[in-house]
Image: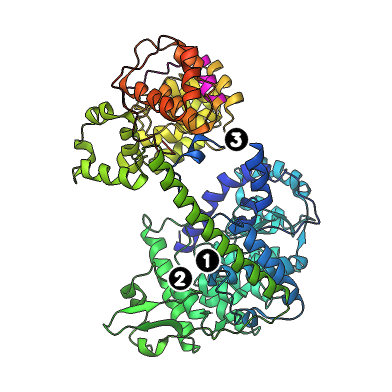
Amino acid sequence: MTTKNKIGWLALAVIAVVLIGYWQQLKVKQPAAEQPQSAEQAAQPSAEQTADRGTAIKKSAAQLSPYAHCVEAGTHPGTAQQRLTEQLLPLLQAGKTPAELLQYDVTAAVWYKQYAESIAEAMHIIGADTLDIRQPSILDTLAERIQQELSANPVAFARSLTTEEDFQVFVPVGLGTLNGSTLISPSLLFLQLSSNIPPTEFKQLIAGKTFSPLEIAVAMHLRLPETHLVQLVAQGRDLGQFPVGYHHYQSRTPVWNLADIAAMLWQPAVLKALKQHDVVPTQLEGVVTGLDFALFTEPPRHFDTKNNPDVQLHLQQAQRGTVAYLITEGYWAHGYQTADGSWFFGNNFLNAGRFQAEDILALLSAQTKAPEVLFRRAEVKPQAVPAGTALAEWVAQQKLDIAQAKQARQQCLADKQQFFTAEALLSREAIEEQMFSWRDGKPLTELALSPLHQRDPAWVAWHWQMGGARQLDADPTLRDQLTDLLHAPAELMAFLQKTELDSGTTAWLLMEVMAKPELVPAFTQRFAPKAPAYLYPGYGFKPEQDLQALLDAGFDLGIQDLYGRNLFSWAFQTSPETVVLLLNAGLSPFVQQLGPDALDLALEASYLQRELHPALPNILAQLTDPEPSHLARLKRLELYRPDLYQLVLQLKPDLKLPPDTKPNELLSPPLL
């Protein structure tokens, strides 16, 4: 099997697992008239939504914590960038080019790279008119076919896709991208499956069809054979247009045309084919050039280059070939040599700081021009935004918002310091300083935590948060094997009964199990069980529904992680109702041996919320012998929240403080 075929089958192995489940997600309908959003836009709530949530939902203990970082509150970055894109749209529609807009001085309002990304996002919106983008429901029938035919005979399935009436109907991916595309279609699925179709047959299958820059970009991203790529270019349409729908997240620098993508993905054959259609890489002085794209882009992440020498060699050769071609075409890159002889690459639009100078210089062959000629120090000559335009008004408003946000942050810092002083609490800086002093450079595994717990359990929680409780990654091989079994409980049980999992993999599997109660029996019967490295349920876990389902399936709510923490640590960060649910299910509030227990956390939450935590009555009813940390937190209530202290005494009248009790000097960190 050739290297290219190995790469093609590697891509197929990835998408075969992803696409079946992914296509089901497409059934979440989206109005056809909506323009597709970028991943950043879709993921971020607007400032108005954030404000509404703030008034509707009481702040959590973590949000109220005096140790929470003061952020420059203001317009959400995603919202600000969306509004910037809205200002740029009419300018581009009126004929302004990205090169012209990039000359404007907007540095007081937005970072260079964010500005370029907003221009690119506006171009995506404009270019969406060139594609047939519809609601995901159009592909529901194809989802059924994927389940039936993809795994059985992928190549035959790929051939059949070319006859579909909806071959080039696109639907939004939603969050993120799939092989660089924010859209998906039968044509893109065909390309993802076609690496092993012979060139002659490939040409016959696509006869009479034309392909957009997006489809050609995805084909390059998948590293289809050069014969396939060149044929797609020969049958391309609008080749010089902006590659709408394509995002390459290995480099945040926006691409401006299809040749930029070819340079970025190291496809010299495609560069030569595109040149015949007068499409060449961008050359914007002070912004980016085609050689920048070729030099300062990382290998695609969907290839396991570290563990596959053949793939690694193929990509290295492709990059060298691309760099050599662009140099012969007269391209240069942004960079310069400093006075001490070292090299600096990139500029404000182009982030090349993650690349080693020797690696970049090694890409230049001995026959090329000297580095002093190939690299130039070039910056954009800024021009003022035309007065009276909507863009100028946005820049002025954004400058004002930034100034107000900075002022609000300074006020937040001052308020926190006043709080620490008035209520005799150690500041975050003081806590961290004492923690580092206590550790004194010793290996974390050699530190005895019992004395720290006796001093105050919150110190142990700070130790955990400051690197003392490593989460540990899942073993990638085991994780992949388990992923294939998550939809087959019986097979998963058989696998777990004979396979020992490490703590990191156990924690990852536990998150999956908590979302799928039917897997609980398999989890409880695993061979040589180890404690998970952490106990945080996966995204979307709904305690009020899912905890009961887990209990019904036989899940042990008393499970502890590698460091002895139980589910109360997570519950207090989630909601008061979650804490009550755990208590009602029989989880003891005092079972945790190290770090703050449920009573410590409930008293701290009461102190911060300035009202009794709903779980306190239940917890106090089970209290027989209060610990020093409990009494210290009660003393804090007596001194600084006397009304709450009296309410606690009403709940448990025999809970009296010894005369010499001192209040605790620190609280648990915002995130345990």
Which is more toward the observer, 644 or 136? 644
Give the residue type at disc 2: Asn
Give neighbour class at mark 3: few <14, some 14-19, many 20+ (Cα, 10 Å). Answer: few
Q: Are the two marked residues, 1 and 2, in contact with CB atoms closer than 8 angstroms?
A: yes
- Residue 465 magenta-highlighted: no
Return the x and y of residue 585 as percentages of the image width and height: 51, 15
Mark 3 or mark 1, which is nearer the start of the sequence? 3
Q: Are the two marked residues, 2 and 3, in contact with CB atoms closer than 8 angstroms?
A: no
Q: Which of the 4 image quarters holds residue 149?
A: top right
Image mark for residue 573: none
Mark 2 or mark 1, which is nearer the start of the sequence? 1
Give the residue type at disc 3: Lys
Name the residue beneath numbered marker 3.
Answer: 58
In the picture shown, does residue 246 fall above or below 73?
below
**Image position of 438 (left or right of 162):** left
Name the residue beneath numbered marker 2.
Answer: 351
Residue at x-position 64% and y-position 50%: 45
Q: Do we see residue 286 in this rendering?
A: yes
Give the residue type at disc 1: Arg
> Which residues make up the magenta segment?
577-593
Name the residue beneath numbered marker 1.
Answer: 252
